[in-house]
Every structure is written in C-alpha cells, then in structure tokens.
C-alpha cells in the first residue's frame, strides 16, 4: 500500500498544501500514484466524528427513528459502537447515509460516533440508503412508500431530477417502477400527521393503505382531523383499521323492505338478508331487475 511505503509524511504534505515543482510532478509517476492512493483511501476512511457535524438526510426511511432507542443506547454504553455508520461529505460537514439510530444513540450518550466516510452523490447515497435498509430493517409498506415519496420530492426539484427520480426510487427499493408511482400517490394522499398517529403497521400491505389513501383523497379536511382521534393504546395495525373506520361514510341503518327481507346499504354496497323460504324468488326478481336496468330489456 502507498501509505506503508511513504508513511504519513506524504499525506501531511498534501494536506498542508505543499507543492512540488511542475517538472518533478511530471517525472515522478510513483509519487502521483501514491497521492492518488492516499486520496482514495481517505474517501473510504473510518473515523470518530462529532455527531453534531452530521446532518440527517432529507429522505426519511423510518416513521420514528427514535422509537425503541433506549435498548440501543444501553448496548452502546456497555459494549461500545460495534458497527460504523456510513456518511457522505457535504460542503458544511457530513450527511448520514445509513445508521441513523446509531447516530442518535451516540448523540444521546454525548460521545463521538464511528463512521465510514465516502464521497457519494445524492443519488448514490439514496440508493445505498434504500438497499441497506431493505436488507437490515425490513421496513413496513408505509415506510417504504414514504421513502419513495421523499426521493421523488427531493430529486424532483429540478426538471432534470424529475426525470430521474423514479429510476432512483425503484433502484433503491428494488421494486417495479409501476409500484413506485402507487407508493408515491399513497404516501402523498395520507396526511403525515395521520401516518405518524398510526405508526408503521408492520405486516399490513399495500391494499389496506391504499384504501385509507382513497378515503383521505375523498375527505382531505377530515383526514387531518382524524389523527387526533386514533386511539394510541391500540397496536399499529389496529390504529390503521380505526382510521379507516373513522373516515368511512356511515352505514344506513338496516331497514325492512318487505316481509322476510332486510336490506342494508353501506357506501356503494347493498346487503340483503333473505329468509330461506323466499330466497329463490328474490334472487330471480333481482336478476330480472338488473337485466332490465343494465340492458333496457324489461322482458328478460
């Protein structure tokens, strides 16, 4: 390695801005290779950093990174930080790529955080963040949807970025591009305060969240107010179901349409409860009525 051959003197000289004459630089390829090697190694260096010099990225991947942080704080206090976080250089310091909870734990302990420092573009950092979190954290559907929405929001600030944002999102999460669009719509349709009140709802898939998103689109003002009504004593999936119930249109009370038939209307559904003795006649009557309505064929 170049560092073993040249020691720290070369690195110190480079950092202090010492310059060799132009003719020496041109005639010393070994020195040039050593300089390049030191600089490349420095890009991937692991070091202890002040947590205050590291800012959080704008793209969230957890609804609440501090949730359950006490156990991690206790572990690092007792055993030290075993796994470094990954940060990238930015003009005024560093930005976290992944390892947010370790960073927060070190902040809480008032100690420096061990970090791997890399030179990365914003897009490279987002992709690394998504790939690492999918592999380690198993985020819930809504957390992945918020991540997608954050990518599109942050990278879509320019015309050039808008064309590339979806590509970065599906590369980061390794999902189909069509799902990226649906996730973005779901995350943007549900008020963030309602998402926070519900929580990650681990184990709940796209369809339930999509149902809530449609209800929020139909009642945007009510959707924001519902956040305060979600009972926090319930598990997160149950809080999601409660929010759906709060936003669903009220069902009409059951009414007796005729002897032996009870009809209930719920949203765009009609539920009939029919006594077994007259079920065949009711079924035939309904079928004739539907045919007449849909096909304008009273005789059918």
Image: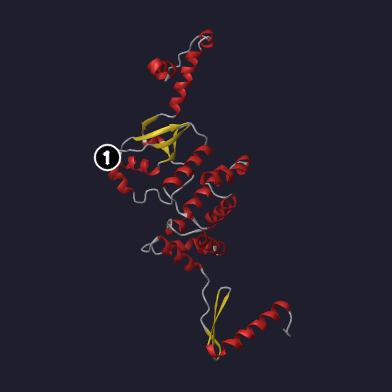
Picture mark count: 1
Nearer the observer, 273 or 155: 273
Q: Position of residue 38 (x, y in %)?
A: 44, 21
Q: Is residue 188 left or right of residue 67?
A: right
Q: Position of residue 273 (x, y in %)?
A: 53, 83
Identify the image quadrant of residue 241: bottom left
Image quadrant holding the N terminus, namely: top left
Identify the image quadrant of residue 161: top right
Neighbor class of circle 1 (other Cα within 10 Å; few <14, some 14-19, many 20+) is few
Q: Position of residue 57 (x, y in %)?
A: 46, 41
- Up/down of 178 relative to 270, above or below: above
- Up/down of 80 relative to 202, above or below: above
- Give the residue drawn at x 47%, y 69%: 245
Residue denoted by label 1: 79
Nearer the observer, 108 or 83: 83
Image quadrant holding the C terminus, namely: bottom right
Specify the farthest residue to the left: 78
The image's colour scheme reads secondary structure
- Give the residue drawn at x 51%, y 64%: 222
**Residue 156 seen by the camera:** no
Label 1: which secondary element: helix
- Give the residue drawn at x 30%, y 48%: 71
**Residue 27 seen by the camera:** yes
Identify the image quadrant of residue 43: top left
Q: Position of residue 115 (x, y in %)?
A: 39, 34
């Amino acid at each position: 390695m170049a560092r073993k051959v040249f020691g720290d003197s070369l690195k110190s000289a480079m950092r202090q801005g010492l310059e060799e004459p132009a003719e020496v630089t041109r005639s010393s390829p070994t020195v040039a290779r050593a300089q390049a090697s030191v600089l490349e190694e420095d890009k991937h260096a692991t070091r202890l950093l002040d947590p205050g010099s590291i800012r959080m990225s704008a793209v969230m991947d957890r609804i609440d990174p501090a949730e359950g942080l006490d156990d991690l704080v206790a572990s690092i206090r007792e055993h030290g930080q075993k796994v470094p976080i990954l940060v990238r250089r930015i003009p005024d310091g560093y930005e976290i790529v992944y390892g947010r909870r370790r960073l927060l734990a070190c902040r809480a302990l008032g100690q420096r955080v061990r970090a791997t420092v890399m030179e990365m573009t914003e897009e490279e950092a987002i992709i690394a963040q998504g790939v690492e979190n999918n592999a380690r954290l198993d985020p819930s559907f809504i957390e992945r949807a918020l991540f997608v929405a954050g990518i599109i929001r942050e990278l879509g600030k320019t015309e050039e970025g808008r064309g590339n944002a979806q590509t970065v999102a599906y590369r980061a999460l390794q999902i189909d591009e069509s799902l990226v669009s649906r996730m973005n719509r779901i995350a943007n349709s549900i008020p963030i305060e309602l998402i926070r009140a519900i929580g990650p709802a681990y184990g709940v898939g796209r369809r339930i969240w999509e149902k809530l998103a449609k209800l929020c689109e139909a009642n945007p003002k009510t959707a924001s107010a519902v956040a305060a009504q979600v009972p926090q004593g319930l598990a997160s999936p149950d809080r999601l179901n409660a929010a759906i119930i709060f936003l669903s249109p009220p069902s009409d009370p059951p009414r007796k349409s005729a002897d032996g038939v009870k009809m209930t209307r719920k949203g765009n559904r009609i539920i009939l409860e029919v006594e077994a003795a007259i079920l065949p006649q009711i079924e035939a009557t309904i079928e004739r009525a539907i045919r007449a309505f849909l096909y304008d064929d009273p005789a059918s």
